[in-house]
Amino acid sequence: MRSTPMNPKTVVQQRIRTAERELVDLSRRIHAHPELAFEEVRASTWVAEHLSAAGFDVEHGCYGLSTAVRATVGSGPLHIAVCAEYDALPEIGHACGHNIIAAAAVGAGVGLAGLADDLGLTVTVLGTPAEEGGGGKILMLERGAFVGVDAAMMVHPAAAETDAMPGTAVSQFDVLYRGTPAHAGAYPERGVNAADAMTVAQVAIGLLRQQTAGTDRIQGIVTEAGSAANVIPDTSRGRWIVRSDTLEALAPLKTRVARCFEAGALATGCDLTTSPVGPDYADLRPDPTMLALYRANAEAVGRTFSADAAAGAATDMGNVSHAVPTIHPMLGLDCAPAVNHQPEFTAACVTPAADRAVLDGAVAMAWTAADLSGRL
């Protein structure tokens, strides 16, 4: 029969508060050095170093991913995984606050490290690269990172506090049209215009939106469409995202969008190539029992929940939630009207409110793990 320390939640909170300066520094360092998907060399190293210093058995560069981290402490029968994200967005840096996510995950691990065996826990902090499109957690899931895990959790900053993000299913892909260049004034009849192919596809998608569900989203950017006005473009490229409520609803929508791009090729005579950008993200299915425990713990440390939620957002934690009981609550930074993926939100992620979110998120997750251990 295992012995349980008195007031384990108090001990957990004290351990996290003792590490406050280091956790806030970690969040701010990651924010100051944004790294894109699969390139999070510094961030993953810092996360690994902090967890090693806290007594975790750390593997850096695992599951075939050089910036993935697996850090484990304890040998109890209940295995809890806490996920740390740390990739940034192009040009606008940590506009989704992954610096906060990483530091809060490390903080939860630090809080539980000395109590894991007494609580009957095995605690694994997983550093998960490439949430912003690369699907790092999906790759890690497929390669065994969550085998034996009984519950998984993470926190994510947002403008408002919510216990469950309504995460949608998402597919992201690149589009390439190839045509034939020609002098646009002298020999236009000899050209096959790749930019026109993209235009036809965009018009078709615009019309398609009239017949899609209100929660469906089709978004894209054109990244290349010619270099000179007097040369018929032989190449056009774009990146597109298709979103729907569930993976089941996503599949037929993807087919309809694909036909829009085929129409561009057919109308112009261009060759079309599409290629996925990472695996499809599944809809997020939070576990109601864990969610209730987390919410009570977050409120106990002073968090106030809002009815607002980031509708249409997506995460590769969704795929994890289809395999393991999972929660993905949002930490409010009280920064409205600034919201995720805006430069203003980048700035909001290194404020006193952001620093407090790191600590509160760490405590709430660690307390939730402790509560789950009591249900053995």
Image (cartoon, rainbow, N blue to C red):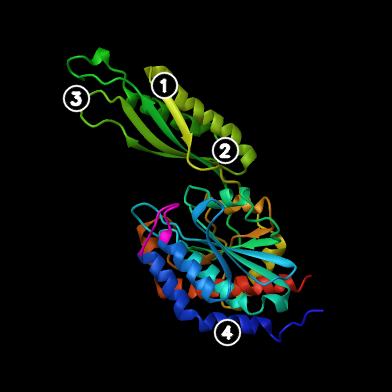
Foreground label between 2 and 3: 3
Image quadrant where one finds the C terminus: bottom right
Numbered circle sitting on residue 213: 2
Assess disc 1: are there few (<14), some (14-19) or many (≥20) residues with their C-alpha within 10 Å of its C-alpha. many
Q: Residue at x 60, y 46 (%)?
A: 282
Q: Tell me, yes or no, whether the two marked residues, 2 and 4, touch with CB atoms within 8 Å.
A: no
Which residue position is annotated with label 3? 230
Which residue occupies the extreme left position in the image? Answer: 186
Segment tinted magenta in the rendering = 33-41
Q: Is residue 343 above or below residue 18?
A: above
SS of the residue under disc 2: loop
Assess disc 2: are there few (<14), some (14-19) or many (≥20) residues with their C-alpha within 10 Å of its C-alpha. few
Q: CA distance from mark 2 to mark 3?
A: 41 Å
Q: Nearer the viewer, residue 62 or 283?
A: 62
Q: Is residue 35 magenta?
A: yes
- Give percent across and percent down for residue 82: 60, 64
Foreground label between 4 and 1: 4
Which residue position is annotated with label 1? 265
Numbered circle sitting on residue 14: 4
Q: Nearer the viewer, residue 68 or 111?
A: 68
Residue 152 lies in quadrant: bottom right
- Give percent across and percent down for residue 87: 44, 57
